[in-house]
């Protein structure tokens, strides 16, 4: 897991690295600019492209000046620098880099008048106007510059953060900053990169390391974490010699209805493919034939017999996919909530919890709720932006001592500790019905296999997205069934790399 920091903490890490490595501030800027350039040249190898570097007067602008010099030395022949000199304040490293650029690359024009800027289709804009130092909304000259850049059809590559984009906090109102095709960001992704409201500002981002002190980064207090593959590899357990089906737990999936049996089948099948020892599906009798065909390994409990069943024998119970919200299903939910053990609650279980809010207090500690945005707002109230929604999820997870898996392009896993773990895997090819049912099955599988609730949620969300990413390399659409089938191979790959 990687700590994610806010802008002032990142500034603090810069200062710590400068003092303790030690490295001069100007050399750290050079290292950052070089890291940017290395990524840039791999992406844009065409040295004849016209490159317009827009520089502010702070350290982001200083990066821009260093980048212009480094690109010129590598052989990029058509570089122009625009100096946005609108303030009395300039950073020391900006001044030094401006002097170096004038001395070492005298042929590069330094423009100050916007009338001299003519952006065309195949040009590349390097946006180094304002970075993580943004402290107020864009107005005046900066706003005009952003408008001019956005109105062009040039490719826009932002240094660290697009000009005008807030790295953390609520993203409200109309965005008037630079729209970047690519952001090459330093050391850590900024927290707001993971929020849907960043779509306009950021098409794609890449993180490049610049050698900031990792130990110090990890020591700073932050409830924002990024789930990493390294972390997943660390927690995933190998399948032991002399183990048997009993070793990997027995899961119960309570799901499906006459017209929504597919949800139960997908969940059950995903649970099996993620490695559970045994799975029972509690479904209406009308689905039995389909279950036998789709997942012959699964056992069956007739829906009417749920309350008579011995629930103690299951290591994990999931309730909700395609279940329905009638009186009888509500009884099932209420009966389950009486069990003093974590549950995985999805879809109709969540819908019932939003209609009967008093039941929320009865959710057993360490249960895992997997709402998408609409289910979340129905459960816990409307939210106008994602920052406030995720904050609300964090508070609810703490208050109810549960895990809330708030599903999105980047899923937010809110833990009872108050931490928010952001999952980086997953892609739009997976945006199709059935994906949520599959995720529920996978998480339930890991819970039954003896992982803690937090581990099961993180493993489930990460591997679900990763499987989708691998499949999306070769196809435009990833169906839920295809994802299920790919899970065993992914598990093998992850586990082989671990051992
Ligand atoms: N040593 C360091 O601190 C490093 C900094 N780096 C770069 O430095 C950037 C941060 O630099 P700075 O802190 O100097 O800040 P910026 O260069 O982002 O902004 C410069 C200044 O502009 C002013 N400003 C903020 N919002 C404004 C607005 N809306 N309109 C007009 N002026 C505004 C602020 O006073 C701010 O300090 C990072 O994004 C990164 O690109 C990198 O070179 C890595 C090392």
Image (spheres, rainbow, N blue to C red):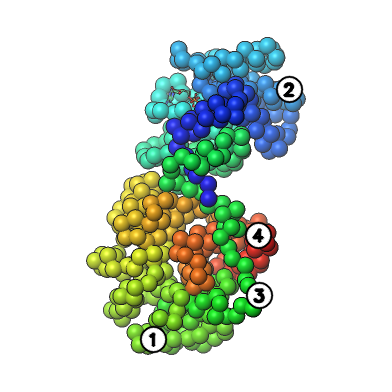
Q: Residue at x 51, y 76 (%)?
A: 249
Badge 2 vs badge 3, beta-carbon distance below 8 Å: no
Task: Report, in whole angstroms, how far the alpha carbon at label 2 lies from the one at label 1.
Answer: 74 Å
Q: Which of marks 3 and 2 precedes in the sequence?
A: 2
Mark 2 highlights which residue?
A: 73
Badge 4 vs badge 1, beta-carbon distance below 8 Å: no
Mark 4 highlights which residue?
A: 498
* Residue 241, disc: 3
The mark lying in front, picked from 2 and 3, is 3
Residue 307 in the image: above or below residue 40: below
Q: Which of marks 4 and 3 precedes in the sequence?
A: 3
Badge 3 vs badge 1, beta-carbon distance below 8 Å: no
Task: Report, in whole angstroms, how far the alpha carbon at label 4 lies from the one at label 1.
Answer: 39 Å
Q: Is residue 236 visible?
A: yes
Q: Residue at x 42, y 51 (%)?
A: 419
Callout 1: SS: loop
Q: Residue at x 40, y 70 (%)?
A: 343
Callout 4: SS: helix
């Amino acid at each position: 897991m990687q700590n994610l920091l806010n802008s002032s903490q990142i500034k603090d890490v810069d200062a710590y690295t400068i003092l303790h490595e030690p490295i001069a501030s100007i050399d750290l800027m050079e290292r950052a600019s070089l890291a940017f350039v290395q990524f840039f040249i791999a992406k844009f190898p065409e040295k004849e492209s016209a490159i317009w570097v827009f520089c502010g007067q702070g350290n982001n602008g200083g990066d821009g000046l260093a980048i212009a010099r480094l690109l010129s030395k590598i052989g990029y022949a058509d570089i122009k620098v625009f100096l946005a000199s609108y303030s009395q304040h300039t950073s020391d490293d900006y001044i030094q880099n401006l002097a170096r650029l004038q001395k070492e690359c005298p042929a590069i024009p330094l423009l100050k008048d916007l009338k001299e800027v003519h952006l065309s289709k195949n040009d590349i804009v390097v946006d180094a106007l304002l970075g993580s130092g943004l402290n107020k909304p864009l107005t005046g000259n900066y706003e005009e510059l952003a408008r001019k850049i956005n109105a062009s059809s040039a490719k826009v590559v932002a240094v660290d953060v697009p000009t005008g984009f807030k790295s953390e906090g609520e993203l409200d109102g109309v965005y008037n900053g630079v729209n970047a095709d690519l952001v090459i960001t330093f050391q850590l992704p900024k927290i707001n990169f993971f929020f849907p409201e960043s779509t306009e500002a950021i098409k794609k981002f890449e993180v490049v390391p610049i050698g900031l002190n990792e130990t110090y980064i990890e020591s700073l207090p932050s409830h924002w974490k990024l789930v990493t593959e390294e972390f997943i590899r660390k927690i995933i357990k190998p399948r032991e010699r002399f183990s048997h089906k009993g070793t990997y737990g027995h899961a119960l999936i309570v799901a499906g209805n006459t017209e929504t049996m597919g949800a139960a089948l997908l969940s059950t099948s995903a649970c099996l493919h993620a490695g559970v020892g045994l799975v029972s599906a509690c479904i209406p009798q009308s689905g039995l034939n389909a279950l036998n065909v789709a997942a012959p390994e699964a056992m069956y409990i007739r829906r009417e017999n749920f309350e008579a069943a011995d629930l103690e024998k299951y290591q994990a119970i999931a309730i909700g996919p395609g279940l329905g919200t009638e009186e009888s299903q509500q009884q099932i939910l209420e009966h389950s909530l009486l069990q003093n053990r974590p549950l995985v609650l999805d879809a109709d279980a969540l819908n019932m919890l939003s209609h009967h809010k008093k039941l929320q207090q009865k959710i057993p500690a360490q249960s895992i709720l997997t709402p998408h945005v609409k289910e979340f707002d129905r459960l816990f109230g409307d939210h106008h932006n994602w920052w406030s929604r995720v904050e609300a999820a964090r508070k609810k997870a703490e208050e109810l001592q549960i895990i809330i898996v708030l599903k999105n392009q980047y899923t937010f896993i809110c833990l009872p500790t108050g931490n928010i773990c952001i999952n980086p895997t997953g892609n739009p090819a997976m945006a199709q019905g059935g994906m949520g049912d599959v995720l529920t099955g996978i998480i339930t599988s890991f819970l039954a296999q003896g992982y803690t609730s937090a581990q099961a949620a993180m493993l489930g969300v990460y591997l679900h997205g990763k499987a989708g990413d691998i499949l999306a390399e070769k196809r435009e659409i990833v169906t839920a069934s295809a994802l299920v089938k790919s899970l065993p191979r992914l598990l093998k790959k992850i586990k082989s790399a671990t051992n």
